[in-house]
Image (cartoon, rainbow, N blue to C red):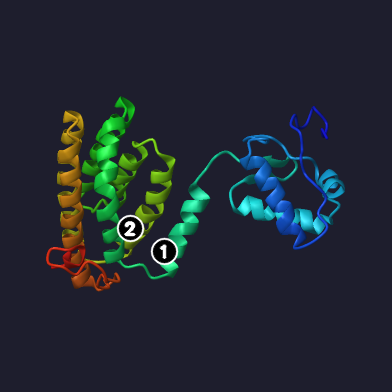
Amino acid sequence: MVFGLLSYQFMIPFQPVKIGKISERIARQIKDTILSGSMKSGDRLPPERELVEHFQASRISIREALKRLETSGLLAIKPGSGVFVAEVNSKPMSESLSSILRIQKTSINEITEARILLEPNIARLAAERITPEEFLKLEQNIEETLAVLKSDAPAPEQNIRFHSLIAEATHNPVIASTMNPIFDVLKEMNLEIKGNLPMRTELSREALAYHKRILRAFREKNSQKIYELMLSHIYQNQGGLKKVTSATQTLPLSPLKRGRGRGGISNILG
């Protein structure tokens, strides 16, 4: 059934909903239609009255379903204009995962453990796929970090953005979507550290020094060197955070529970 070719130029495979949680089943049908490609970013859904008729459901159920899909980032509700399939955007998911990590009281040690397992390999993959434009973004990030440090202020946001740019340079949306929540939590943890301005600024300078070396390795297309530098950098950063947090007592630094062999990940903090 086609709903007004001037408004929506796609076939609507929706079926009437009779049983179960009505709003959830409506949301599932709309979601499946979007994920199947039958509806694309920017497509407008039929008006509420037509959805009510098609699903044979109440306006309340329709509104609940649409709100659920808006919250998940699949739909954009624009008052006065209609309901549209949202542009592809992983930000809502990233923010949701970041919130879950914070609610679970994720410690800096747990964040570091994940980074050690993931980031060196991500950086190595990025070395094989990075474009000139993405390399330029890394250079610009270093210049932005330098500008902040020249004012004798720490630059945690800029330094963390450097790592996010590397994840994006893999051209793998799964990797970027996985790492962004981790980087978001790491950024929030850094911003929560108060006091010890000179120590925090020095930590940012040390991170920048590593970033410059990593950038040179990217220029040389030396993926193994990038892997090793990234691994060393994460250990260095964790050591610096230990010193800062020991002085400020602001971040949770719970001991890691796995890999207790000598030299294992659990020995990061010395």
Judge left or right: residue 243 versus residue 1.
Answer: left
Q: Which mark is residue 101?
A: 1
Q: Residue at x 26, y 70 (%)?
A: 256
Is residue 70 shown above or below 222? below
Give me the C-alpha separation between circle 1 and circle 2.
10 Å
Q: Residue at x 77, y 59 (%)?
A: 22
Question: Which image quadrant: the C terminus?
Answer: bottom left
Classed neighbour count for the residue bearing mark 2: other residues with Cα under 10 Å, few (<14), some (14–19), many (≥20): many
Q: Is residue 85 in view?
A: no
Q: Which mark is residue 186?
A: 2
Judge left or right: residue 189 versus residue 177.
Answer: left
- Which of the pair 147/25 is nearer the observer? 25
SS class, disc 2: helix
Residue 87 placed where, x, y %? 58, 38
- Corner quadrant of residue 59: bottom right
- Corner quadrant of residue 14: top right
Going from N to C along the chain, the mark reached first, 1 or 2, is 1
